[in-house]
């Protein structure tokens, strides 16, 4: 049985989530509902939940302030939030799950189904705190079957699709295989000078060495790899690199 705590400064939000979680009462037992950081902190330390549904904005504080104040963080976290571009980006980069308000029952089901495959390692929390700080460069968590990598975005040269997996090629010559699709990383990295040149390729435009014109145009990256440019994307690609 999963012991869960709900934390949100809006009463109607916790009431809705409680109602949705009734469907999962055989597996999830709600042991507390809290609406401020102080009560939430004391209860987490006392009750030791397995799972915390955590609103990002808590009155004058944030979920990140609460997490930093805790001595022990041995529980799963599912963030809940109204749309907040920067907070959601930090959460995604750090490989945590989140639910947008108003919470949808199908999204909740999918998120709960992923719980058994996720862990809150210190690296993930380190990445989350780093990515919500004032640091300029973001870091991304790449979880593999055996290891978790804490990567600077600026070290990623390119990504290549391999079915439901994605291979990351790094500036130091190493590679990492992530158990998520290229589409997932395209959505995450597109605002950081990454470009999807082809169905199977996502490149960091800062590592482009040369552009080769022609019917079958391609780029040569700094790691000497040759990456094709899909014909339908060629014009947009040229416009993009001309703006760099």
Image (cartoon, rainbow, N blue to C red):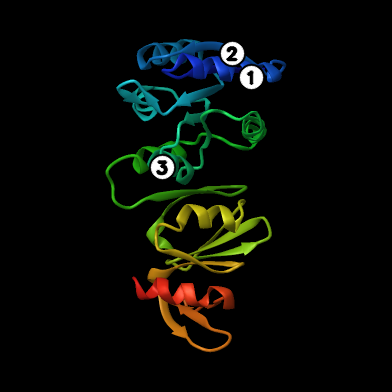
Quadrant (top left/top right/bottom left/bottom right) for the C terminus? bottom left
- Say the numbered circle drawn on residue 123: none
The numbered mark, 1 or 3, whose residue comes first in the sequence reads 1
Residue for badge 1: 21
Cα separation between marks 1 and 3: 26 Å
> Residue visible at 40% across and 61% down?
155
The reply to whether the C-beta atoms of the residues labelled 1 and 2 are less than 8 Å apart is yes
Front position in the image: 172 or 79: 79
Q: Earlier in the sequence, mark 2 or mark 3?
A: 2
Q: Which mark is residue 30?
A: 2
Name the residue furthest bottom: 214
Instruction: Indicate which disc, 1 or 2, sits on the residue closer to the N terminus.
Output: 1
Name the residue tied to disc 3.
85
Q: Is residue 36 above or below residue 167?
A: above
Left or right: 61 with respect to 104?
left
Q: Is residue 214 left or right of residue 22?
A: left
* 108 shown above or below 24: below
| Foreground: disc 1 or disc 3 | 3
Query: Element type at marker 2?
Result: strand
Q: Are marks 2 and 3 in contact (CB under 8 Å)?
A: no
136, 23: nearer the viewer: 23
Residue depth check, mark 1 versus mark 2: number of the one nearer the observer? 1
Give residue 169's position: percent from left, percent from top: 51, 65
Q: Is residue 24 above or below residue 191?
A: above
Separation of residues labelled 1 and 2 (CA atoms): 9 Å
Q: Quadrant of the N terminus?
A: top right
| Crowd class of label 1 (few under 14; some 14 to 19; many from 20; radius 10 Å) | some
């Amino acid at each position: 049985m999963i012991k869960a705590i709900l934390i949100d400064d809006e009463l109607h939000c916790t009431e809705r989530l409680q109602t949705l979680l009734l469907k999962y009462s055989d597996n999830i037992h709600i042991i507390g509902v809290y609406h401020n950081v102080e009560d939430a902190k004391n209860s987490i330390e006392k009750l030791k939940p397995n799972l915390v549904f955590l609103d990002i904005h808590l009155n004058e504080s944030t979920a990140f302030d609460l997490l930093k104040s805790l001595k022990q963080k041995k529980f799963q976290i599912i963030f809940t939030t109204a749309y907040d571009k920067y907070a959601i980006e930090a959460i995604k980069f750090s490989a945590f799950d989140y639910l947008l308000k108003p919470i949808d029952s199908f999204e909740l089901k999918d998120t709960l189904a992923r719980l058994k495959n996720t862990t809150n390692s210190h690296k993930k929390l380190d990445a989350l705190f780093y990515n919500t700080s004032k640091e300029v460069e973001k870091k991304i968590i790449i979880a593999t079957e055996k290891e978790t990598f804490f990567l600077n975005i600026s070290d990623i040269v390119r990504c290549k699709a391999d079915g439901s997996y994605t291979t990351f090629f790094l500036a130091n010559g190493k590679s990492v295989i992530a158990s998520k699709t290229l589409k997932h990383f395209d959505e995450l990295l597109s605002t950081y000078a990454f470009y999807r040149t082809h169905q199977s390729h996502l490149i960091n435009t800062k590592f482009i060495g040369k552009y080769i014109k022609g019917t079958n145009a391609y780029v040569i990256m700094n790691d000497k790899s040759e990456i094709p440019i899909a014909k339908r994307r060629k014009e947009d690609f040229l416009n993009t690199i001309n703006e760099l």
